[in-house]
Amino acid sequence: MNPKSNHKRPKTGKRRTFAARFLIPAFVSVSRPLRLLVITYYWPPSGGAGVQRCLKFVKHLGHFQVEATVITVDPAQATYPVLDESLLAEVPPTVRVIRTGTTEPFESYKKLTGRAVPYGGFANEGKPGLLQQALRFVRGNLFIPDPRRGWNRHALAAVEQLLAAGEQFDAVLTSSPPHSTQLIGLELKKRHGLRWLADLRDPWTDIYYYKDLHHTPLAAWLDARYERQVLTQADAVLVTSPETKRLFLAKLPVLPTTKFHVLPNGYDESDFRQSSAAPTDCLRITHTGTITELYRIEQLLKTVATCAAAHPEVPLRLRFVGQVSAELRGQIERAGLLPITEFIPFVPHDKSVEYLLESSVLLMAIPDVPRNFGILPGKVFEYLAANKPILCVGPTGSDADNLLQECGAGQALPYQDAALMLDTLETLVAQWRINSNLDLPAVSHTRYSRRALAGELSKIMNN
């Protein structure tokens, strides 16, 4: 796919910084703490990227006179792709967490396929066989918006029990994916008229793997109808990037732009108390998290091989921490990079941060899919907090590109731009010869701390 052929941004005059495109209402003081009901499927001991946003909001909201109650799923019944028990320690002891049962089809999936629960975008499945294709069709047409909708009635019952006991909440926040969680907020709005904040960490019917679910026209229509109802009925819609805001407004231009608030993912300052430990014996490039062939780093891998061959005196090393697809491993092998590549399976979040700090350079990539200009991986903020140069493979002019340039941490390298990739790597190699510590002298990223973003959420609640 050509990363630039199907998406051009309208010209809007002077380019604004990523941060300048935030829309945050003015703060209104209150005389008592606000009470927020957070409804999220992903919560510790779930691991991975999906759990971080709500966990960090709740962790820091107490500093802004917001008391949070969390409704989530019982981990004994949940279907999490990965677990991270260490995150349980980050839940403040004053926060009430209510765990419910659930009804989901994933046990049947595991028995039929012999495989684990699919990651987002099926990153851990590889090339699907006939059975997997059939199961994706079932998932896309019988479980709308998604198979975790079976949790909704359990979560709704828990909320009704709280309300029947006389508890009151100033607002309800529903976080997705799974986007079925937004239907809980929709139902609570209809039944009780509660103030509702719909937090969408990813697009809904425009998410990059949507076509892989093989929706029939009827199923696609119903899913899009749910999406419109949520965007229309929610009192506020929270998104993680300016492009996602633009995407939703383009779908429903009659909605006021003030309804949509860009609250990106961020980094937790407490995760970065330890010092950087850049290696002195090699120039190590590290990627953390899930990555597949959709991220189109094959040209970068070839360029790394070229650079390594041209500078044998500078030991280049690659490290992948987390899920790497079989096809991408094949690309690494074909580039001749297996001898200098280290694969580390999923690790707890705190250990993942250690690997960032033990690196010379950090690698991230934006999947080469339609509407990828708004994809802003949560890891980018932790990459920024690690204060390392960032190699970002993806489209220029995207939200990720704007953010990196704003913070002085790098720029997007188009998927096939071998010349720019080589020039960037050669510059890093030359700098490494002078000083093996490539840490950046200063990066303007403090506005993206989790605590600061929790403060912005409290302002939205107070509005």
Image (cartoon, grey):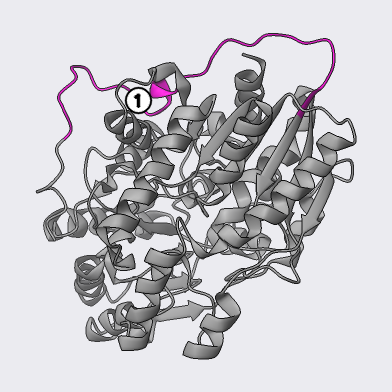
The residue type indicated by label 1 comes to Thr
| Count of marks placed on residues | 1
Chief SS of the magenta region: loop
Question: Which region is colored magenta?
Answer: 9-35
Q: Is residue 302 left or right of residue 61?
A: left
Q: Is residue 28 magenta?
A: yes
Please indicate whether residue 279 sits to the left or right of residue 246 in the image. right
Tag 1 residue: 17
| Residue 55: percent from left, percent from top | 69, 47
Residue 245 drawn at (x, y percent): 37, 31
In the image, residue 172 sits, relative to residue 181, either above or below, namely above
Q: Is residue 147 left or right of residue 389?
A: right
Identified at 48% across, 55% down, the residue is: 437
Give me the residue at 86% from left, 31% from top: 167
Does residue 114 appear in this view? no
Disc 1 packing (10 Å; few <14; some 14–19; many ≥20): some
Residue 297 appears at what percent x and percent y?
26, 66
Which secondary structure lies at badge 1?
Answer: loop
